[in-house]
Image: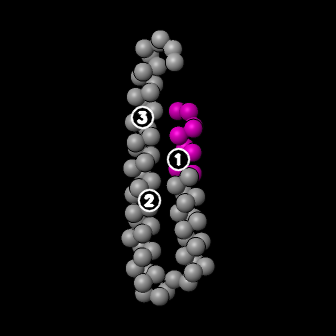
């Protein structure tokens, strides 16, 4: 920790970006479940396809979160 007040604005900026990413990731997961659950209940989804879709969903969330590392 440093005594520089300008860092406080950086922390607020980062917190806004993190909250935005969390919201995006929640929406992504919600849409995945909205589509995946009815398809699985209808019997059209094999376990292999379901596992692959879940993996892709997780990778999408991770990739979206890694965009926080990128500097604007």
- Residue 71 belongs to the span the image colors magenta: yes
Which disc number belongs to residue 50?
none
Identify the residue at the far top of this view.
Answer: 3
Marker disc for residue 65: 1
Read off the residue under disc 2.
28
Q: Secondary structure at mark 1?
A: helix
Determine the main secondary structure of the stretch shown in magenta.
loop
Query: Magenta segment, which residues?
Result: 63-72
Closer to the camera in the image, 72 or 56: 56
- Above-or-below relation of 38 to 14: below
Q: Residue at x 42, y 51 (%)?
A: 24
Observer-side mark, 3 or 2, equals 3
* Above-or-below relation of 40 to 52: below
**Residue at (39% x, 50% y) in the render:** 23
Which mark sits nearer the N-terminus, 3 or 2?
3
Callout 3 crowding tier (Cα within 10 Å): few <14, some 14–19, many ≥20:
few
Task: Find residue 15 and name its label.
Answer: 3
């Amino acid at each position: 920790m440093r005594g520089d007040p300008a860092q406080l604005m950086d922390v607020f900026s980062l917190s806004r970006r993190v909250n935005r990413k969390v919201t995006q990731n929640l929406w992504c997961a919600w849409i995945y479940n909205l589509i995946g659950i009815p398809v699985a209940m209808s019997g059209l989804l094999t376990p292999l396809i379901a596992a692959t879709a879940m993996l892709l969903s997780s990778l999408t969330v991770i990739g979206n979160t890694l965009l926080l590392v990128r500097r604007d």
